Image (cartoon, grey):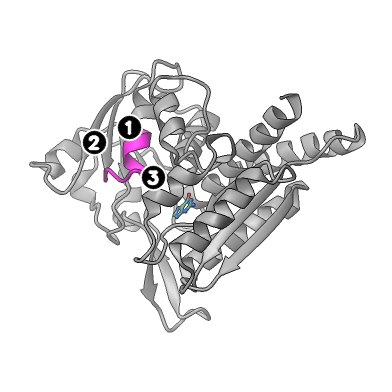
Amino acid sequence: MQILDGRKTSASIKDELKAKVAELKKEGKKVPHLAAVLVGEDGGSITYVNAKVKACDYVGYDSTLIRFPDSISEEELLSKVDELNNDKSIDGFIVQLPLPKHIDERKVTLAIDPAKDVDGFHPENIGRMSLGLPSFLPATPNGIMELLKRHNIQTEGKHCVIIGRSSIVGTPLSILMSRNDKHANATVTLCHSRTKNLEEICRDADILVAAIGKPYFVKENMVKDGAVVIDVGTSRLEDSSKKSGYKLAGDVAFDEVAEKCSFITPVPGGVGPMTIASLLLNTYEANKRFQSA
Ligand code: GUN
C-alpha cells in the first residue's frame, strides 16, 4: 500500500507556481490576486480560508480576505460580490460555503462573474466543464484528478465508484472521471443515499471515492483488494487529547482499509491540500486570461 501524499503533491504544485510568479515579477507583470469572502465564525471555514490565504502568500500571489458577521444580509453580500466582479485588481474570488441559512447560496453563486469564479461553481463553468470546454474546474474534484495523474495512476477503463453526489465534489468528479481524456476515461458509478447494494458496488471499484461526510463509513468489507481509495471526508470529532479539542476524521476507516488497497489518501494530508493547490492553479489561469484580454 502506498500513501497518496496530498501535502507533498500540493507542495510541488505550489513550488511550480512560485517559480512562475517570480518570472511574472521579473517581467514587471501583475501577479495573480485572489480574494476570499468569509461569512461568520464556523471553525472549519475559518481554517480553510486561512489556509488558502497562507498558500497565496507562499506562492507570491496577492490576497484579500473579506470577513462579515453571520448577520450580514443577502443584499449586502450580493453587493460585495458585485464590487469584486468589477474590481480590476482582483483576478478571481471565492465565497466560502456554507453560508448562513438566511442567505441563498445559489443566488450568491450565480452572482459571481464566471470569469472570476475560481471555485468553478457557477453554472456556466459547470456547463463548460460538462461539454469539455475550457473552464475553471471545481477545486476538490480537480485536485483529486491531479493527485491521480501525478502518481501515474491509470483511470482509463477502470471502474470508479463515487459515494456522494454533492454539487461541489461527487457530481463534478463523476463528469471529470468519465471525460474523454487519457487521464480520465473511467466508467463511473455515482452512489447516493438511495443506492441499493452499496457495499457490493463499492467492492467492484478499482477507484473508490468517499465524499459523504460520514466518519469512517467505508469499511474493509467494502473495498476490493488492490483498489485505489480516495477519502474526501473532513468531519470534526471531539478529542480532548488534541490542543484544538478535535480531530479530523475521514469517510474511510483508514487502518482496516489501508491494508487492502494499492493507494490511499490520508485525512488530514490527502485531498485537502490538493483542493488549495487547484484553487491556486485556477487563480493563475484567471490572471493570465485577464492579462491577455
Ligand atoms: N466549502 C467547502 N469546500 C469549499 C470550496 O472548495 N470552496 C468554497 N467556496 N467553499 C467550500
Q: Secondary structure at mark 2?
A: strand
Q: Amino acid at mark 2?
A: Leu
Categorize mark 3 by other alpha carbons within 10 Å: few (<14), some (14-19), many (20+): some
Residue at mark 2: 190
Q: Is mark 3 within 8 Å of ligand 1?
A: yes
Q: Earlier in the sequence, mark 3 or mark 1?
A: 3
Q: Earlier in the sequence, mark 3 or mark 2?
A: 3
Label at residue 78: none
Residue depicted at 25% across the width and 33% down the height: 205
Categorize mark 2 by other alpha carbons within 10 Å: few (<14), some (14-19), many (20+): some
Question: How far apart are the alpha carbons under marks 3 and 2?
Answer: 14 Å
Q: Secondary structure at mark 1?
A: helix
Q: Secondary structure at mark 3?
A: loop
Residue with the most extreme bottom position = 240
Q: Is residue 3 visible?
A: no
Q: Are marks 1 and 2 in contact (CB under 8 Å)?
A: yes
Q: Amino acid at mark 3?
A: Ile
Categorize mark 1 by other alpha carbons within 10 Å: few (<14), some (14-19), many (20+): many
Up-down relation of residue 251 to residue 189 (above or below): below
